[in-house]
Amino acid sequence: MAPPLAHRRRSGVCGIFYEKGIAMHPTDHLCWPHLTPVPDTRLDVPTLWRCALGLALVCGGGVSLLCLLCLLLVWVPAAWSAPPTYQVQLFDNPTPQVLPFLGDLDEDDTAVGERYQLGRSAALRVTTTTTTVLAPLSPQGYSSAAGISHGYIIGWADDVGTATGPGTGRHAVYWAPDGTIHALPNSGAGPPGGGGADMVSPDLVVGSVNTPQIPGLPPHAQDRQVPAVWRQGVLHVLPALGTEYGAVTAVSASGVMVGISGGFSGLSSYQATMWLFDQPLALAPPDSHASGLNDAGEVVGTATFAQGRHAFLWAPSTGLLDLGTLPGHSVSGARSINTAGLIVGASGRTDGTQAAVLWEERQPYDLEMLISTAGVVLTSAIAINDHGHILAYGTLDGEPQNFLLIPTTPGIPVPPVALIDTVQGDFNGDGLQDLAGRDAQYSVWLCLSGEPQCTHIGGWLFQLVAGDLDGDGRDDLAGLGWGYTIWAMTDGQHFTQLPGQLHTLVIGDFYGDGHAHLAGLWGQTLWRAPRVGWWEWLPGTLTTLVAGDFDGDGRDDLAGIAPGYYSWVHTASGWHWSPGFVYTMHAVKNTTAPDTLIGAWGFCLYQLTTALVWQTQACEALQVSR
């Protein structure tokens, strides 16, 4: 039996809110909502408000705009796999007495940073065989490189002038692949300053600029930096949380920006911030910062949790997650995340020593335990590119050194375009993790480990899911298409349309037979598939649906919210009502424990126990951006 057919919608959809009936144009770069109403009885202002409020509780951020973010991005947890092992290479250093500080890594393993020598810093481009000092703005000016993207390098440089005239001060700059330097305009107020931190291309650069002096502020608050973006070379100063101060540290290909904003010493604390449509959203409580993000909208950084100051992952569908530390450690911080969701950073002990860390599926691994090179001590992982190659810092036989770590197993090729809705799985049965996702035009790409490039599958799909649907030992892909049609690819090459239509699609082992099954909602009616293309109706009415093993029996369950904000979980023994009310819920996949179901109501977050009872996690006031 198949879900009933429905009238074709007048517009495509973007992200995960298709079930809320919001019409989107598939070619919009950031999927701006159209004003065209879509017939759906569930689309109303209270629904959208509850969406934004619930996500703000999870994310600790701005109420009105986080709902927009959910329209853009969806995060699907990847399948678990063992961490890779790495071979170790050394970055070039022609001056062993002065080790360069390197801060970013390009896809061709070129690193950038600065060398500080004789009282002067100089921007560098470094590989394992060469070191290049980048051109300054003026012969005696300082410079530093902060980021690199496809050969373009971003940073700052000083124009100190020459004997024939004064300079113009510090500027954000970028170096083109041919080595030429290009200055970007500064604020024109206060002393020139600031600098670039990240870029997609010369047409999209982010960083900070100095602010003018503000009457009434104490001296230590004057001449501070404010977040900035340069589009087509034109400077735009961005608003911040609470005050004007902050900096953008990273930008995605779609233009989403993250960094810090909100305060200065003595008045308030900086806060991890996302700028969406140039408006600031708080991602974490005060005393936090965001360091990096990928094109799927996943953000990493450092925040203060009840358990201590730890690395965090923020994703559109999960909100803020504590990544924890290595065993026996007390603090951690995340620096970088790649397309596959691999995260790198550091974890520290109470005695001040620390270790470089790789987080895979939110599990921390000591990178030093994943190498076999004698004499190497790794203390921090700085950046990871889409090949999975890592820029790390540590010592070799006691001497400081910058390292390049290259996986010994074949890596996933770098997608030629930014991918959204990324999922992972072993799609060709070789035992290695592969990557799949859709681009901004909703066309699907498949990136197999060990292959030189990704394969363009095509189609027009959203909300991709991955799992072994046919039991052949290889993971398959499924997704929703135009008119909420259902599509699956089980041969690794072609999508086939399945009977029926769904608004919501999830995947899991709902029957306990060892392979994956599809389930979803059409309207408020629940359907699941005992095998591909066959559907069975489950009694009950839900407005939200998620999947995971919530009771710990090794078999995936379905959970959702019914009208009236009641929460229900369908396990192997049938439906179970969990007392209490939630108006949003999301599932967090775990590799070594039952999956976690998080719900929100009012100003509180709740977690479902394996006994299917809600327990309070946290209750706190919303922090709403200006």
Image (cartoon, grey):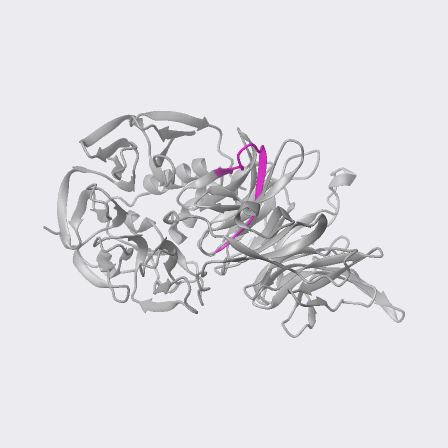
The x and y percentages for residue 378 are 62, 47
> Which stretch is magenta?
322-338
| Residue 425 seen anywhere in this rendered image of the structure | yes
Left or right, 502 with respect to 189, comes to left
Based on the picture, tell me whether residue 62 belongs to the magenta stretch: no
Quadrant in the picture for residue 118: bottom right
Percent from the top left, x then y, of residue 249?
60, 52
- The answer to whether residue 236 of the structure is visible from this angle is no
Magenta stretch holds residue 335: yes
In the depicted view, which residue is nearer to us: 474 or 155? 474
Residue name at image x 24 percent, y 50 percent: 503
What x and y, as percent, mark residue 498?
A: 18, 58
Can you tell which quarter of the image residue 152 is in?
bottom right
Q: Which quadrant would residue 44 be assigned to in this image?
A: top left
Q: Is residue 173 above or below residue 421?
A: below
* Residue at 41% over, 45% down: 67
